[in-house]
Every structure is written in C-alpha cells, then in structure tokens.
Image (tube, rainbow, N blue to C red):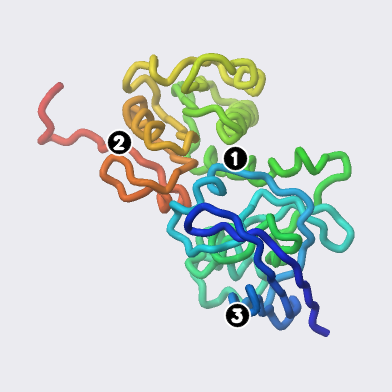
Amino acid sequence: MSERYAFTAWDYGADAQLRPVPYVYVGDCAQGWEITRAGAPYLTLGAGYVAVASRFCGICATDLQREHLPFALPQVTGHELVGEFAGRAVAVEINASHWHRGVDCSGCWWCQHGFANHCPQRLTLGIDRLPGGFAPWVLAPRRALHELPATLSPELAILVEPLAAALRATQLSPPQAGRRVAVLGCGRLGLLLIAALAWQRRTRGLDFSICALLHRPGGDVLPRLLGADQVGLSSEATGGAFDLVYETSGSAQGFLQALRLARQAIHVKSTSGQGVAGLANLTRLVINEYQLAARPPTSTDAPG
C-alpha cells in the first residue's frame, strides 16, 4: 500500500526569500515516489527511498548562499539532518545514488567502483532537487541512514554530516609527515577540520603541524582545544608559508588568501558559488572534491 505525506514547507527561491508551499509525497520504497509541489508534479523518484521524519537540521554556508549555486530553485533546503525512522534517531547522508538507494548499479561505473558520492545521476538532499531537512518529511535513500546512539544529543548529532565532510577532506588531501598544514577560516567547518586533522595525526602517527588561521582577532581557544598547534591571523601569514591549506571560509577573499599561502596544494571545502580569480565559481571544485596543486617547475621555467 502506498504511503502519503502532505505538509507545508518553506521553499528557498532564486531571490533568496522563503515562501510556504504545500508538498505531497505519494509512493513507497519498492515502487518509487511522486512528489507534487503546490498541486503540480515536481519530481518522480525511483525505488529505494524511505520517508524520514525531520527532527533537527543544521544551517551551513551552502544553505545561506543557495541562490548562487548552479542548482534549480525553488527548493526545500537543509542537509545537516537528524531524523527519525522506524522509531530510531538517524543521521542522513546527502547523496542519493544508485548504491545509496540499494538498486541495480550495473549501469553506473561510479557506484560500482566505490565512488557513489560522485554518481552523475545522483540527487542531493536539500541541494539538488531532492527536498531537504527544512521540511517535516524527507525522502532519503535507504542505505543513507545511520542510527545514532542514544547518548548523542540531536543538537550535537547535526554535526555528523559536516564532520564527515571534514574527515573526507583529510582522506582525499592527507597531510604528510613534517609538513605545515593550515585551516583557513575557523567557523564550524574549520573547527571540525582541525579536529579531523588532529585525529588523523594521532591515529596515523604522523608529525605535521596544524595552524588555524582566523580572519579577525580573537577566538583562538576552540582551535587549540581541538588540536591546532598555532593560531594566527590569515592577513599576517607569510606567502607560501604552508604546504597544504584547507579553505573553509567560503568567501572569494578566503580563496585568494589560500592561493597566496599554499606552497603545494589547496583543498577548498566551502564556496559562495560566486566568481573569483577568473573562475566562474568554485562549486564543482568543492562538490567533486578536487585538490588544487601547484604546477611543478619545468626546465623551461626561469630560475628563481
């Protein structure tokens, strides 16, 4: 028997305004779902999605800059989600790929080879078409649910998704022993990245330094508690002072500072979606988790 969920949610529009809009989900995990918005067809989903009650949802820079990102609007945003499914508290992964839905992956090289987070046919909760956590209900891939321990409060559990993103950055751009590493921008994501780097250093037994770079004075206590060895101002750091820079500010100025400070590589973890340094925007760089690496010198380069 099909399930039905009717509710009103706040759509985020291209003008960065929120408006209440009625939504209806009809379907089930086996057969798929039809989503209507304001009485008109909005989205057809295949099999592999389950209805999850949204209980808590964090707000990140992506949500605040949503109108600049290259995905269709209006949409219900929110992806740092703690929900309830079958009476259990769950954290929800944001990518709805073939693998996460638990359907046939034979036609998708990405899902077959362990790159489901980059499946070209995926939807993304609260970012790309799939209604997000600022609705009372979300349709989430059945493999994207992770039960949370009872000892973890929901207010803390909304950090599971951004912490996972921070850990992923340290896996894709791992610091090497003896290197100087900087985290540029010490908001919530930057602080989580510092914690992830400290964990990597401890578990891998590596000796690299972690420097937290602030955009304004003050706020050095939390970076040090989470594992930073030094805390300083980004404006005062010497050009080329760091081997690897993780840029988490999401601002054009932060990206330009990262270019100045990094000697070997930059890993961009947040973007405003706007143009900078001749690039139309950095969204794909962030989504596809690319690392910007310095070009090695060649025999044709002038000395010095």
Q: Secondary structure at mark 3?
A: strand
Query: x and y percent of residue 17 in the render?
Result: 55, 54
Q: Residue 187's image quarter?
A: top right
Give me the disc on residue 41: 3
Q: Nearer the viewer, mark 1 or mark 3?
A: 3
Q: Residues within 10 Å of mark 1 (few under 14, many from 20)?
A: many
Q: Residue at x 65, y 46 (%)?
A: 161
Q: Nearer the viewer, residue 288 or 74?
A: 74
Q: Earlier in the sequence, mark 3 or mark 2?
A: 3
Query: x and y percent of residue 153 in the render?
Result: 83, 40
The disc labelled 3 sits on which kind of residue?
Pro
Is mark 3 in CB contact (under 8 Å) with mark 2?
Answer: no
Q: Secondary structure at mark 1?
A: helix
Q: Residue 256's image quarter?
A: top left
Whether residue 125 is visible:
no
Q: Nearer the viewer, mark 3 or mark 2?
A: 3
Residue receiving disc 1: 167
Query: x and y percent of residue 288 in the render?
Result: 45, 53
Query: x and y percent of residue 107 in the render?
Result: 51, 77
Whether residue 101 is visible:
yes
Residue receiving disc 2: 294
Residue 262 vs 225, above or below: the answer is below
